[in-house]
Image: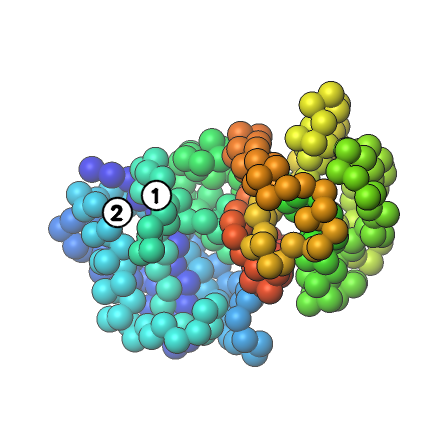
Amino acid sequence: MATILIALGANLGDRGETITQAIDQLATDRDFNLLQRSSLLVTKPVGGPEGQPDFINAAAKFETSLSADQVHQKLIEVEHLHGRVRKLRWGARSLDLDLLLYDQEVRQTTQLTLPHPRMSFRRFVMQPAAEIAAEMIHPQLGSTLGQLWQQLVSSPPVVEIATPPGPTAERLCAEVQRQLGEPMVHIPPPILWPESATQLSSVLTQAIGEAAMAWEPPPGHAVNLFPWWSELPCLLDTSAVPSAMPTQPRLVVLWIPASESVDPIETTWWSPEARASLERRLEEAVNQKVHGPRLCLSGHDMTTAVTEVTAAIEAMQ
């Protein structure tokens, strides 16, 4: 029997009753054994069109004899029983069921990604999940759900973008700030980028050092959004000293941009092969060192990355 964790949400109809019925329907299925259900949590919509009703969210932990694919199909069937129609991403819905964890399985297919790729930074997912499954381990991050939840609620509201350095990342942060508003998001002043890649490490080290002195968002701002990852200078210069930030950020976003979104100046710093090598090393370093909330965006263009990061910041509040 596999232990699984399911997230539930609804913001249409009798939301609480729908979620309760969905859990009961799975619990009475011979292939499922209900271990625990969470309290119901009222949350604001994240992403999607404006003007949506509030959500009610919950989580449920089961044992099952089904495979992950079979569980995924069963959840879709239960959604359909409650009138779920998938028309608009992050739109209003009568019922949403997401398979968060299936034991320690890690996979990515067109139908199913495990663990759920956005679970670790979404408060509306992590709060009910940690309530009933704090001991379950996120197989990619190596942290328990209880530890991830504590980082979400106790770490400073800081987001770092782990991506090759340059104006591309700065533009991403500026666009996110424009979407959410300056009172919401604070970003540092633009860096005076050098002409040569050999100078990037020293430039970033200085900028990161200044950021460490102002780690908390300034008064009137909810989030500090930095267009680099504090470990980046070490990837550019093997002699660089690892950054000593005051605490861990609340979220690290790994972004490997689509080639069409990369600023022209960055194409003069590295050959295509050298940049690809940096991106591989960056991805490996994030996977090795980041054990807290994380969002991975590989090959995403600027527009998609802005949408994803904007929604992630809203979801972690």
Q: On the rendered structure, is 126 left or right of 274?
A: left
Judge whether 71 appears above or below 89 on screen: above
Mark on residue 107?
1
Q: Residue at x 34, y 43 (%)?
A: 107
In space, the residues marked 2 and 1 are separated at their CA atoms by: 10 Å
Q: List x then y, in percent, for residue 145.
A: 47, 39
| Residue at which label 2 appears | 68
Judge whether 9 appears above or below 150 on screen: below
Q: Amino acid at mark 2?
A: Ala
Q: List x then y, in percent, for residue 297.
A: 53, 51
- Tell me the quarter of the image containing the N terminus: top left
Judge whether 47 appears above or below 65 on screen: below
Mark 2 surroundings within 10 Å by alpha-carbon count, few (fewer than 14), some (14 through 19), many (20 or more): many
Q: Residue at x 72, y 42 (%)?
A: 269
Counting every numbered tag in the picture gives 2
Between 208 and 262, the residue placed more toward the observer is: 262
Q: List x then y, in percent, for residue 144.
A: 47, 34
Judge whether 103 appears above or below 307 on screen: above
What element does badge 1 sit on?
strand
Q: Residue at x 83, y 43 (%)?
A: 194
Q: Amino acid at mark 1?
A: Arg
Q: On the rendered structure, is 18 left or right of 43?
A: left
Q: Earlier in the sequence, mark 2 or mark 1?
A: 2
